[in-house]
Amino acid sequence: MRRRKGLFTQAGLIALSALMLLPFYWVIKTAITNENIYAYPPRLLPHHPHLFNFVDVWYLIPFPRYLLNSLIVSLLVVGANVAFNAMAGYALSKEFPGKGAVLGLLLSSMLVPFQATIIPAYLITAKLGLINSYLGLAFPLLSTIVCIFIFKASFEAVPHSLIDAARVDGLAEWRIIVRILMPLSKAAIATNVILAFIWSWNAFLWPLIITREPAMQTLPLGLARFLSYLEDTTGALYAFAVMVLAPSIFLFLMAQKEFMAGLSSGATKG
Amino acid sequence: MRWKDFIGSRWVIAALAIGIAVGAWNGYIALNDGGLVEGRVVDGGGRPVPGATVILLERNFVMHSERQRTRTDAAGRFRFAGNDNHSLRVEAESEALGRSELREVRLWFRAQNVSLAEPLRFAGRLP
Amino acid sequence: MARFSDRAAEPGGWRGAKRVRELLLIACLLLPSLLVFFLYRLLPLLWNVVLSLSYWSPLKPARWAGLDHYQEMLTDEVFWQALGNTLIFIGASPLAIVLALLIALLLNSEVRGRALYRGIVFLSYPLMTVAVGIIWRWMYDERGGIINYALRASGLIAKPIPFLESFEWALPSVILAEVWQVLGFYMIILLTGLQSIPEHLYEAAAIDGAPRRAQFWRITLPLLKPSLFLCAVVGILNSLTSFDLIYIMTNGGPGHATELLITYIYKSGFGQTRFDYAAALTVVQFALLLGLAFVANRAAGGNAGALQQR
């Protein structure tokens, strides 16, 4: 009876996995196939597979440029996030007058999704003169409340004796944060890095609003832009999609546990 | 963090591996980007066709346009220099045999030196 | 951490020079983050309300409009359709959550390769939604898409269905793509919740002779309330913010069959440059979000579904 149930479960999970992986297979097959992809019936296996679609995408679409833009913005966001969130998390782990108000402000800000702010956010960014700039692309994401609370919790878990000992040794506050608290918060830093990277890497609506010229577009924009462009009969568009997805999938495979923990804690700490 | 842990961590290894791969690839490109395109032209029976006109077409976003012409030598060989595209087409013409097949040549990087594996074939045979 | 009152009892209390330096430091530490949130969360919220009550255009000075935009909304067909579509979208999340619960239950048992299956189901979540949209658009294609091919090959339909171009199928098709992407996220939340239920509760119930089904309804489900509430909130948020997928797959079409509030806001604001009307739409959307979050909170028993500590 146990064995039957176990087999059932395995079969169900295998079927589920097949369904979840089917879109990936279909896109990869289209990207490497050497035929008219609109021909019916479509072949289930790639016909004369080749990798030259990827070469086409590299040269005919400014893929390197998009990649560079996405990388710069993401690095900006990740760096600023770790710095600002750790700073704010540390500040919030101490006592000061008005702390309740600040906490209330942050918690209520969490209720406001980004999409509810796009119109004024655009106007503010225009006023700041940051339209079509890397900083403008990164600004709304430079700090996230969820990660502040993650850092706060992580710092509060450090035993006071360590901090007090450091203070007695005459360490400045800065050094306490960098030398003692941060190394003990590696999980928080990892979560922050992953969340910040994903949010900035995948961001589409904000770059769509903020960029004015193709040279500043990020990867999602580049992909969307060529959706209509490359409606030819080759798999070039899907090669582009595969190239865009490759970094995310690679990172996911490298850091599965941290990914799942980070993304789920990113929501549970709400 | 101890140095050993740091270097052995999968992130550092992955970054190094990627860096080495990118460097090696770029090195290979630097050594092989002379822009040479070579090949042979044969007729239906496999005999080389001297004096045929060979046309090199390069890709221009969605179409291929002519870039160069040359003639095959006595042994039916031809060579183009100065190609800087990654997607080419080659075909040959001859008064006696008309037009040969249109060969699609796709490269791994622009101006890659390439030597056609299969010779360009004409349908007919030389007398 | 010293309590507030302890500090006050220190010599010099809050006014000692060292204390002032500390407060200054705290202010500096908080400044960058607070600046970002002020500029991009709080200020926009207020600005939206103000904008929605005025006639605003980039070139002319603003005039007071009162509730004109809201009145216009009441007679705007596209608005009502967008609202309806958004609600349908939200209504589909319970189905996704139930499905995710089933998967989480399967993964909670002692099957081999659990971690692998978990990874496979979760893989779709961190991906770029634009790319997911392109993939699914291709899967739904009439000629080269696998969905039509599978349906025709298995004899279920005779002619291909233009999924993304038909009035009946467009919204469900997009919803399916959305579910495919978010399923892994729900699953992880529910799995974490399942794994935090103490074993001894099940053991005690088994000793008392409770059948498995009763164990599920009486123990598992009630203790999963916080996780279910979280999934519900995420589902609501997703539906209200699912711009990328719609833009890529259908751009709101055919007609306005897949128009969501967020895409209509984008089109009004950045397509027609009617920032004021778009702001009014945003206010309505935000009110909808708050209302639904409130209802969900109530349904979960208040307190964000937190468990009653005994």
Image: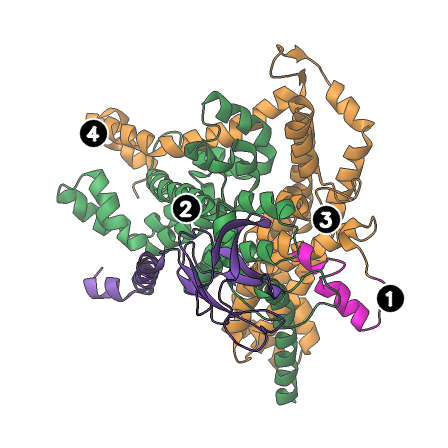
Chain colours: A green, B purple, C orange
- Does dot 2 land on a helix, a strand or a loop? helix
Report in which chain the residue with disc 1 lies: C
Q: Is residue C109 magenta?
A: no
State the extent of the magenta-drawn residues as a range: C136-159
Q: Decide: few, some or many residues near mark 4? Use Cα within 10 Å; few <14, some 14-19, many ≥20.
A: few
- With C21 as the anchor, is C247 left or right in this view? right
Q: CA distance from mark 2 to mark 3?
A: 33 Å
Which mark identifies residue C18? Answer: 4
- The three-letter amino acid code for the residue at tag 3 is Phe
List x then y, in percent, for residue A240: 54, 54
Judge from the rendering whether residue A206 lies leftward or rightward of residue C63; answer left or right: left
- Tag nearer the camera, 3 or 1: 1
> What kind of residue is marked 1?
Ala
Confirm or deny contact between disc 2 and disc 1 (CB under 8 A). Answer: no
C140 in the magenta segment:
yes
Residue at coordinates 74% horizontally, 55% vertically from top-left?
Answer: C173
- Disc 3 packing (10 Å; few <14; some 14–19; many ≥20): many
In 3D space, how far apart are the residues under numbered discs 2 and 4 (Cα atoms)? 42 Å
* Cα separation between marks 2 and 1: 47 Å
- Which mark is on residue A71? 2
Look at mark 1 in the image and give the residue it sits on. Answer: C158
Question: Which chain's residue wears label 4?
Answer: C
**Residue C237 is at least partly visible in this image:** no
Q: Secondary structure at mark 1?
A: loop
The x and y percentages for residue A95 are 34, 36
Residues at marks 3 and 4 touching, judged by CB atoms closer than 8 Å: no
Closer to the eye: label 2 or 3: 2
